[in-house]
Amino acid sequence: MADAGLITLADELAADWALKVGEPYTPGAAGHTLRAELADGTPAVLKIVVPHRENEHEADALELWGGEGAVRLLARDDQRHAILIERCEPGTYLSSLPMDDALDVLIGLLPRLWKQTREPFHTLQDEAKWWLEYLPRESRLERRLLDAAIGWLRDLAPT
């Protein structure tokens, strides 16, 4: 259940963007996401996030991709940590496919998403360094998997 502040913020954004707000999606880890419709009836999603390192450039990435391989960014409000995105109703979940078929989908998707860019995004090398600092403090992970991840990051980060 979203707190009253998020509900108020969602109402404000809906008014600003002329949205008809619908039911919320299942709560996620860091925010509030609602089904919405634009004034012309186009389905959309209103997403308000709690700022975090993993979502700090979400709007930038969606803007860069421009709907090619990802949902389109329809509007953003960086001060209120909100985005309005195209609604994407999934068909077949990758998790339901045989591993090779799911990998084929990802192999086809990644070149569409790859863009040569710098700011404001982190490099893969910077990400690996960050994970090497973060992961040893993460006690919820199985030790065997944690050690394997750290080993791969140490080997791959310099390359």
Image (cartoon, helix red, strand yellow):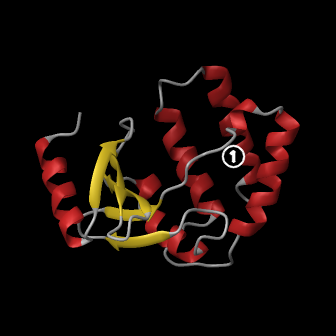
Q: Position of residue 66 (x, y in %)?
A: 58, 75
Residue 27 quadrant = top left
Residue 110 quadrant = bottom right
**Residue 4 as seen in the image, left or right of residue 45:** left
In the image, farthest residue toward the right? 100
Residue 38 quadrant = bottom left
Residue 57 visible in the snapshot: no
Residue at x-position 55% and y-position 63%: 71
**Residue 122 as seen in the image, left or right of residue 68:** left
Quadrant of the rendering where the C terminus is positioned: bottom right
Residue at x-position 21% and y-position 55%: 10
Q: Position of residue 72 (x, y in %)?
A: 52, 68
**Above or below, 72 relative to 145:** below
Residue 4 visible in the snapshot: yes
Q: Position of residue 128 (x, y in %)?
A: 62, 53
Camera-nearest residue between 155 and 63: 63
Residue at x-position 46% and y-position 34%: 137
**Above or below, 49 relative to 113:** above
Camera-nearest residue between 154 and 1: 1
Residue at x-position 58% and y-position 45%: 132
Q: Secondary structure at mark 1?
A: helix
**Residue 77 as seen in the image, left or right of residue 111:** left
Disc 1 packing (10 Å; few <14; some 14–19; many ≥20): some
**Residue 5 as seen in the image, left or right of residue 124:** left
Quadrant of the rendering where the N terminus is positioned: top left
Mark 1 belongs to which amino acid? Leu
**Above or below, 61 relative to 145:** below
- Residue assigned mark 1: 153
